[in-house]
Image: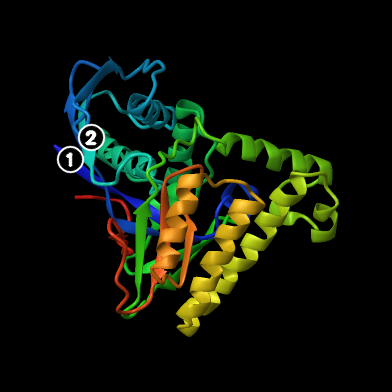
Amino acid sequence: MFRAFGPGRVNLIGEHTDYNGGLALPFAIDRGVTAEAEARGDGEIVAEARDLGEHDRFAAADPGRADGWRAFVRGTVAELRASGVPLEGARIAFGGDVPAGSGLSSSAGLEAALSLALLAVAGAPEPDRVELAKLCSRVENDWVGAETGLLDQLASLCGRDGEAIRIDFATLGVTPVPLDLGDWRLVTLDSGAEHVHAAGGYNERRAECRAACEALGIEQLSEADPDAAAALPDPLARRARHVLSENARVDAMVGALRAGDLEAAGRLLDASHASLRDDYEASVPAVEDTVRTLKDAGAAGARMVGGGFGGSVLALLRPGLVAPAGVRDVLPGPPAALL
């Protein structure tokens, strides 16, 4: 029996920039998904989602299509086999403490945990973590139907205990950034609006970004000239403005953290949220209510996290602040690993 843990993630800043060749600053959190796997000799995969009390069974050589959590399991098996991993039958069970739909990427945690456990079952060496993140992203894109970028998977697989990581998606370079908050706190508060990539506006935003790139004759929206982007028709101009300004906020946040200027960090969270709300139109009323709750309580800054259209709100709280009911502290934890 092999066990593996895949953490969820919080993206401190840099939202909707990953699939646009930009910058982001996520960190793995100390909550996630634990998967167990053991070999079977009959060529079948038997899977159990413990939190749901549901099961699935399929041939490893021909997983077929399915919906929901089953798509993640079948896609992971298929992509591992397609990459040359000699994976035959296995029994899988998993569960976690990151709520699905909260915007904290339980999906990337599941993909990472499943991949590491099944690699161990197959006796295969672990590939480069960036390559494994690409494999997990293919599961989400091609099997689940959500056109996510690599942010969530890289954060889960390449996170650093006690640090955030600055990711440059043009090069896939990863740079650790110390996340020393002292007596300040980073917390999340669930908006109550479920965040679902494949069913929300996420794929529509990706299509708009592709349209903006085609109009500008570039490969990635982060390459856009600001003046040329501003001349695009609405809403493409606003989508481009968000991406370009968000990239700048990532490096400003890195500078604020290294200087220990947490008040500036809070202002950057507020600016990011305003851009996501107004230029990217990725918010919903429940998220706005949650941001107001946190700001009214005295948060230095607050913004939606994840792909938007629901999920959780991240806030930076000054020392001694009495937090609203329901908040959960988020701490940078270690990356996905075999246990």
Determine the residue positioned at 41% across, 69% down. 316
Name the residue located 40 percent from the left edge and 39 percent from the top edge: 194
Work out whether residue 200 can be spotted: yes
Residue 333: x and y in percent read 30, 62
Of marks 2 and 1, the one in the foreground: 1
- Quadrant position of residue 59: top left
Q: Nearer the viewer, residue 24 or 328?
A: 328
Determine whether, in the image, residue 55 is placed left or right of residue 103: left
Q: Residue 165 at x, y = what percent?
A: 45, 64
Q: Which element carries disc 1, helix, strand or loop?
A: strand
Residue 58: which disc? none
**Near-viewer residue (238 or 163):** 238
Taking depth in this image into account, of 162 and 323 the one nearest to the observer is: 323
For residue 234, side relative to residue 175 (left or right): right
CB contact under 8 Å: marks 2 and 1: yes
Kind of residue at disc 1? Phe
> Within 10 angstroms of label 1, few (less than 14), some, or many (20 or more) residues?
some
**SS at mark 2 in the image:** helix
Asked if 213 appears above or below 76 in the picture, the reply is: below
> Residue 34 appears in which quarter of the rendering?
top left
Q: Position of residue 68 (x, y in %)?
A: 37, 26
Return the mark for residue 121.
2
